[in-house]
Each structure stands twice: as structure tokens, then as C-alpha cells.
Amino acid sequence: MPWPRVFFASLEKELIHQQRRRRFATRSEAALKIFEYIEGFYNRSRLHSALAFRSPVEFEQAHAERKAA
């Protein structure tokens, strides 16, 4: 499955379905929720297989600790 399709499948499953199919009142509300999902969860907290199933934050912390040692 190409990466964009994987991302949008995750977005749909983890954000849209959590809304319990509630429609967003405005496009601005939808855009804000999608932004919050991407910046607050997907890019920071979500476990990534390329990072040995660690979040980017955990990966960066481990890298900084190795570099400081």
C-alpha cells in the first residue's frame, strides 16, 4: 500500500471514525481537527516501524542520550 494511502487510512480510522460519524460544523473545524491530529499525534506520538516502533519523540530522546554519552 503506498504511503499516502496508509496515512489517509490511519487518518480515517483514528480521527474520523472517533468522531462517531459526526459531521464537522465547518470546513475550518475539520481543518483544525486534522491539523491537531497530524501535529499532535501522527507526527509526535504514533509509533513508526522505521524507528523500531518508537515514537519520533522517543527516537530523538534516545539519539540525544547516545550522542551525549
Image: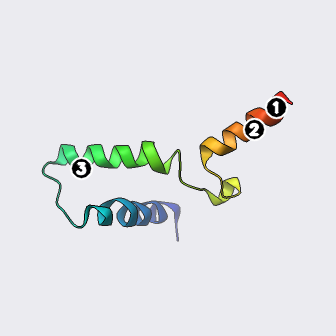
Q: In the rendering, which numbered label is found on residue 32?
A: none
Element under disc 1:
helix
Residue closer to the observer: 6 or 30: 30
Q: Residue furthest right?
A: 69
Q: What residue does disc 1 label?
A: 67
Residue 67 placement (x, y as % from top left): 82, 31
Three-letter amino acid code of the residue under disc 1: Lys
Q: Estimate the spatial distance between the alpha carbons at disc 2 and disc 1, rounded to whole Å.
A: 6 Å
Q: Estimate the spatial distance between the alpha carbons at disc 2 and disc 3, rounded to whole Å.
A: 35 Å
The residue positioned 19% from the left and 43% from the top of the image is 28
Examine the rendered structure and indicate whether residue 15 appears above or below residue 31: below
Asked whether disc 2 touches disc 3, contact meaning CB atoms under 8 Å apart, the reply is no
Residue 13 placement (x, y as % from top left): 38, 67
Q: In the rendering, which numbered label is found on residue 63?
A: 2
Estimate how packed mark 3 is, as few (under 14), some (14 to 19) or many (20 or more) residues with alpha carbons within 10 Å.
Answer: some
- Tell me the quarter of the image containing the C terminus: top right
Q: Estimate the spatial distance between the alpha carbons at disc 3 and disc 1, rounded to whole Å.
A: 40 Å
The residue positioned 26% from the left and 61% from the top of the image is 19
Q: What residue does disc 3 label?
A: 30
Three-letter amino acid code of the residue under disc 2: His
Asked whether disc 2 touches disc 1, contact meaning CB atoms under 8 Å apart, the reply is yes
Side of 69 relative to 3 (left or right)? right
Estimate how packed mark 2 is, as few (under 14), some (14 to 19) or many (20 or more) residues with alpha carbons within 10 Å.
Answer: few
Element under disc 2:
helix
Side of 26 relative to 69 (left or right)? left
Residue closer to the observer: 65 or 56: 65
Q: Earlier in the sequence, mark 3 or mark 1?
A: 3
Residue 60 placement (x, y as % from top left): 67, 39
Estimate how packed mark 1 is, as few (under 14), some (14 to 19) or many (20 or more) residues with alpha carbons within 10 Å.
Answer: few
